[in-house]
Structure formats: C-alpha cells, structure tokens
Image (cartoon, coloured by chain):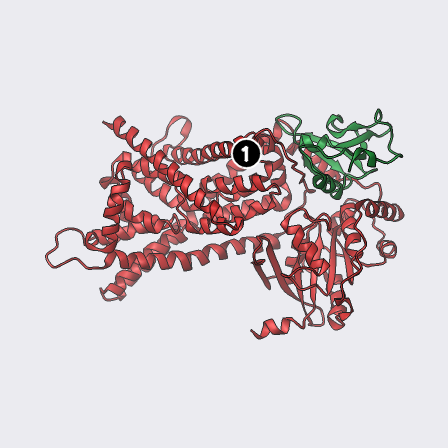
Chain colours: A red, B green
Amino acid sequence: MNAEAASLATPLIALVGNPNCGKTALFNLLTGSRQKVANYAGVTVERKEGSCYTPSGRRVRILDLPGAYSLEPRTPDEQITCDTLYGSSHLEDRPDFVVAVCDANNLRQGLRLALAVRRLGCPMVIVLNMIDLARKRGLRIDVPRLARELGVTVVETVATRSGGARDLTRLLDGIAASASPAWRAPPVQSPADVETDHREVQRILRAIGADRVGLPESTLGIDRVVLHPVVGPILLAATLFLMFQAVFAWAQAPMTIIQGAVAALGGWLTQVLPATHMRSLLIDGVLAGTGSVIVFLPQIVILFFFILLLEDVGYLPRAAFMLDRLMGGVGLSGRSFIPLLSSFACAIPGIMATRTIRDPRDRLTTIMIAPLMTCSARLPVYALIIGAFIPNREVWGGLELQGLVLFGLYVLGVAAAMLVAFVLRLPQRRHWHPLTLELPAYHAPSIRSLAIGLWHRVQIFLTRVGTIILSLMIVLWFLSTYPAPPPGATGPAITYSIAGHIGAALAVVFGPIGFNWQISIALVPGLAAREVAVGALGTVYALSTASTDVANALTPLIGSSWGLPTALSLLAWYVFAPQCLSTLATVKRETNSWRYPLIMAGYLFALAYLASFVTYRVALAWSG
Amino acid sequence: MSRSDRKATDPPESVSIRLIDLPKGIPARVVGLEPPNEHVDAGELRRLAAIGFLPGESVRVIAYSPLGRSPVAVSIGNSMFGLRRVEAECIRVCREPA
C-alpha cells in the first residue's frame, strides 16, 4: 500500500502516560476516526495507531502506548511501552518524539514517569492533561516554572473538549517539519531509580507550590457514599439491576424495528424473485440466519454503553474493589469483575479484558469461567424457548414468570462460574496475592471516547455477522437442501439431505438428553456462534415444513413439537455448552496454547451434558 | 529489599505502624516498605513504590471493603488505590502530628 510506504517518512509520535491520565481520550481527540486498532504480533496487547494533521496540514503518526506506572515493566502492556521507548522492541519502531501525558491533578505519579522517560534522552514534551478539572479545583500550576525545572517543554490540554489539544498540535507542527534523526542511536541508560525520581518530583512540586495537593475533594466526597460499607453494595446492586433492566427494556423498540425490516425484506424478495433454489438460499439461508442474529445489536450496544460509561467515569474499579473480598473467596480477585461483566455482552471482549489481571493464575481462571456468563448470543435461544414453553403470567408481586426464568438462567450461569472457579483454585486457596487496583478520580465521561468505543464494538459484531455467521448460514442451507429428496418421497425434504443424516447420527448421542434430530442439526452450526442455532432451527424447520414465514412461526412450531422436558434440557445445555468457536479461538490466542481451549471445551461439554441429562430426566419423571 | 537495607534515617519501629493498622481517616506519611514475604515478592514491592508508596508521601485510609479490612482503599499522594491486606501489611507509615 502506498500510504504504508509514505507513513515511514512521516514522524512517529508516541503517547506515554500512567493509566487513567486521559491518554486514550487525548489519542481519540488527536486522531478522531483515523485509527487502526490491532494486536501486537504474538502478544495480547492492543496496539493503537492513528494519524493526526497538524495546523499546517502535515501528517504525523500517533502511537498510543499502553499505560504504565514506571519503566520497570510488571505486565505485558508495560513491557511493550518500555521496549518501544528503549528502542529494543522488534514489534515497534522507535518513536521520533515522545509526548509524556500527565494528569494535571496527579502530577506526582505523572512526573515520576515523565522523569524516567526524560532520562532516555529522547526529544519530548510533557502534556498537562485535564487542566480544566485542575483549574476548577483551584489548582494554579506555574507552567513556565515547571518547564524550567524540568528542562522540557510543557503544554496544557483538555482531551475531552474539541480543540483542547491546540497547543500540542501546534508543537507537533514543528516536529513534523524537522524530524530529527539524531535520536536514532541508543541512549545512555542511567540506572532507573524510583526513589531518586521521587525526590526530584518532590523538589519540583515544592518549587511550583503544588506539593500539598491531595485527591480532589469531589472524589473523596463521592467515595464517602460509593465506598460506604452499607450504601456502596446497595448502590452497586441497583446499578447492575438497572443496567440489565435497560438492556431488555430499551432494546425492545429497536429490536422490533429490525425484526420488521427483516420480515419485510423477506416478503419483498419472495414476491420479486422467481421460486428457485436461489430464492430459498437468500430467504431461508441468508436472511433468516443473519436476521435472527443482527436483531441483538441493540442489546449489545446498550450493555457496552453502560460498561464503557461506568468505566470512563471511574465507577467500575470501585465495583471491582467492593467485590474483591467476595471474589477472593472463590480464588479470584476484584480485577476479574470487569472482564466478567463484559462477558455478559460477549465472552470475546471479556476474555480480552483479562489482560488487566496481573496474576497469571487469576487471569487463567477468569478466562476459563468467562463463557459461563450469559452472553447476549444465548438470548435468542433463551427467548425462543421461554416464549414457547413458559406461560406469560404474573407471579407474586407483579413479577413476570418469563422474566423470572430468564433471570434464573443468568443466576445459574454465575453460580456455576463461581463453583468452577472454586474448584480450579482449590489447591492454592489460602494464598492472597496483591491487588494494587487504582481507584481513579471521578470525572465526567468523554462523549467522543464513548462513541468511538461503542463504534468499535458495533464493528466487531457486524463483521462477525457478515463473515462467520453469514458463511455458516449458507453452508447450512446447502447441507440442508442437498441431496434433494428422491421422487415420491413422503417425509420432509430435509431428512434426505446431508444435514438430515448428520442430525440423525447426532440424535443418537443427544437422545438421552431429549434432543430430537432438528435440535441436533441446529447444534452443529451453533458451534460457530450460539445465536446461529436459532437461525439454524429456522432453516431446518423452514425446509421441513411448507410454511414460508418461519421466523414468526418457529415459536408455535416448537411449542407443539417439543415436550417441556426437551425445552428445559435445551435451556440447561445452553447455560454451559461451549458453543462458540470464536471464543475458543480467542482463548487459544490469549493463552498462546491449545491446552486451555481444549480443557475449556471439554469441561463445558461435560457440564452441559450432565446438566441437560439431569434436567431432562427429572422433568420427565415430574411430568409423568 | 532486605531489612538491613533500611535507612539509618528511618524513625524507630515504635513510631511507625503498618498501613493496615492505621485507623480510617487519619492522615499519615509513608516511612518505607517491609522486606518481601511469602505473599508479596520483591517485584511487587517495587510496584508499590512505583505507584507512589515512597517515603514522605501522604497516605490515608479512605474506606474498607464491605466484608472486612481487605481490600482497603487508601489515598497516596494524588491517587487512590485498593490494596489487599497482604500489601497493606508491607507498608510502614507514621501518623502526622495532630
């Protein structure tokens, strides 16, 4: 690509800073939508690069290095930052210029890192970010004096306001004009000594009169409520309850619209296209399949909106803090909370978020139980079965039975996860390792970062629908359609197809847990992505009945053809079954070994089969 | 860091207490870190220093976990961290004169 070749000539600017210093917001402000987010080869650290145009129109590349507290790495993230700055990374070019981002409200931490960076001898500027919040608190930072003491240019930014980085971009203009090649030689590395830097920071803070600054009063005030031993947990429970309530309530309207649109498109295609195999492929395969998945986009967007929002304002680390003791009881730590919460949307971002867990055993346990959190892909299956088999009536106090069953399935998943974690950690249960969880100062959310974060999630989801799910639906349609039934055949066409034969074979395995051959077929493509199972059931029943409007007809159809024990058994199966190849692939990538995905698939299948077997047999005995 | 590494300027043991024993809301200053133990190794101690548990920094207990004394939320310098008991036992502090 020409742009790639040209980028070698454009200067590379690295952003370095503590976690929570607003570095990513600054990156988003500088680069806007011109971002490339990928992974470093071989390691599970996110690499974010973007480009930025300076006021005079020159292009610079901006690299958002992972947040670090010091240049003595303790995590793979910090290792990348460190190696890149030292120029010893084989993954990253050495940057031409370093922007050391400090939270103006937390100069102690920020300047310690900035001093360590300064020792590397690279051309740099120090940015005082969130300067607006500092001013609001009444902090007066003598910037010229600070620059004199440090011997480094210092500029102020407000990353959450458009135009808030004008001073910085003007400065980058000069850099772009005269990228100095002088700094290519490895620098003299004086031994890093945090205590020396600490004394220097104390001296500088005294010199600029900022040595008596503590935490913002607002944060301390909010924490008197949020971290209160009684009010805090109640607030947390209420927040989580509201969040899940919103996922279901707010998503209703957009989901109905999407469903309507898919149905209308299907109807229109039925009218305009001749009744050929092609039409069947388009409507029964592609549209029924992808449509049943895309309908969950609103729920995913809402759940991630809350997760990103709570993270941005600083609440999620507090939730992790409050839950640490509870999760420690099963051998996890509060740090596992955020990945597990994300897993309610989808296990893949959840598993990727475990990178923030420093202890490797904690991280592995969290990865292993992440698929037990009820991800949104299970919702279509749950919704279908509950809609067909659980009567829609009120039980005590206006609670709906259907909603209650759904809630029960969520609880079952969490309880199973805790149990599995407990068993996995039995050998080392008495060991409490360090937590060191930063509880950052509260601040108003950045709309821009929120929007960019949400957009990334939507992109990931739609890419999945457009690639894996779409291609599977097409493959399934072929398997279910060919070979065509012989002339004079009496049974449904699908029983003569390849899928019919696979289903018949699988039904032998799944028979003891009450699954018929239609379910058994649907489980096969469901391996790639759980939500596909509903589309697959749609396709299977579409091709095995005369009806064309299957999406709406599926509920009464399964209601009349399955017994309640089968339905309950399928629900139990879905609580545990590892039916998502992308999750297993993610685990393989994150653990760098086939061992853990195989163990995960094995234990989840065993649990699923056991749970379904028990459920089916008990339900059979119960009903008669 | 071994015990012999501790500086001669450290105040006597009787003045400094472990952070875990510091009552909530009482302003104090960090004196130094304990030597590594079975729960917290030298690397973790360097990490505690890197995030700001350094001699002279002001420290205060903000809140405890709803289920006991671990983890504990402490303000250190301009930041706040959640520490488990094992970490808070490694940090020696002395109360600020009232």
Q: Residue at x 61, y 54 (%)?
A: A449
From the viewer's perspective, tell me whether residue A1 is left or right of residue A226: left
Q: Nearer the viewer, residue A257 or A369?
A: A369
Q: Which quadrant is the N terminus of chain A positioned in? A: bottom right
Q: Can you name the residue that lies furthest to the left here?
A: A488
Q: Position of residue A475 (x, y in %)?
A: 32, 59
The C terminus of chain A: image quadrant = top left
Q: How far from the left and from the top, in percent, is residue A302?
A: 50, 47
Where's residue A462, x and y in %?
45, 57
Q: Is residue A566 visible?
A: yes
Q: Nearer the viewer, residue B47 or A232?
A: B47
Which image quadrant is residue A219 in? top right
Q: Is residue A516 above or below residue A621?
A: below
Q: Secondary structure at mark 1?
A: helix
Nearer to us in this view, A53 or B86: B86
Instruction: Give left or right: position of A180 versus A521.
Output: right
Q: Residue at x 75, y 70 (%)?
A: A179
Q: Amino acid at mark 1?
A: Ala
Badge 1 crowding class, 10 Å Cα cut-off, few under 14, some 14 to 19, many 20 or more, is few
Picture quadrant of residue A562: top left
> Which residue is label 1 attached to?
A238
Q: Chain of mark 1?
A: A
- Residue A561, compared with residue A44, is above or below; it is above
User: How many marks can you see?
Assistant: 1
Left/right placement of residue A106 relative to residue A500 reads right
Q: Can residue A264 be seen here?
A: no
The percent coordinates of residue A275 (x first, y second) are 22, 64
